[in-house]
Image (cartoon, rainbow, N blue to C red):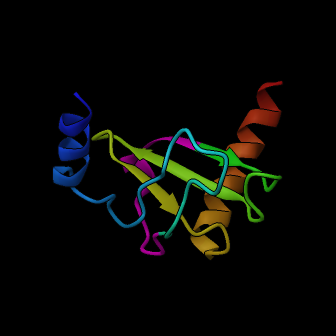
Amino acid sequence: LGAKIVTALLLSPPPRAGAPMAGELRCQCLQTETAVIHPKRIAYVELIPEGPHCGVPEVIATTTHGKKVCLDPTARWVKIVINKILNRYSAEN
């Protein structure tokens, strides 16, 4: 049984660049995407503040096709999207 698991891990593809690493107590985003993604293609955005698990804030977007992409929180377009989301959220509450 153990050999099957090791074989499955060895044969599994490596994580995609910009894809989050879930379930670990460290930064989920090893690389970030700086290319602009049209807001209509973004279904959900998760904002993870810096903390003991990671020294930098993380922004993980899920596209309308279900792909998770780590966004660069310092990119101008990402800041604009985050501000719009936060403004919409504060207006609802």
List x then y, in percent, for residue 47: 67, 47
Left or right placement of residue 9 versus residue 35 in this view: left
**Residue that appears at 55% across and 38% down:** 23
Span of residues in magenta: 33-45
Q: In the displayed structure, would residue 25 be above or below residue 75?
A: above
Given the current orientation, which residue lies at the most extreme front position? Answer: 2
Left or right of 4 on screen, residue 48: right
For the point 65% across and 66% down, the residue is: 73
Instruction: Determine which quarter of the picture holds residue 65.
Output: top left
Is 49 covered by the magenta stretch? no
**Where on the picture, by quarter, is residue 76?**
bottom right
Quadrant assignment for the C terminus: top right
> Taking 17 as reference, is 48 left or right?
right
Q: Is residue 53 above or below residue 79?
A: above
Image position of 90 with respect to 16: above or below: above
Rendered location of residue 83, percent (x, y): 73, 55
Which residue is pictured at 52% across the width and 66% down the height?
30
Residue 36 against residue 19 in the figure, above or below: below
Q: Quadrant where the N terminus lies?
A: top left
Give the camera-side residue of 1 and 48: 1
Is residue 34 part of the magenta span, yes or no?
yes
* Residue at x 28%, y 60% (from the top left corner): 14
Marks counted in the figure total 0
Give percent across and percent down for residue 91: 80, 33
23, 77: nearer the viewer: 23
Q: Nearer the viewer, residue 72 or 13?
A: 13
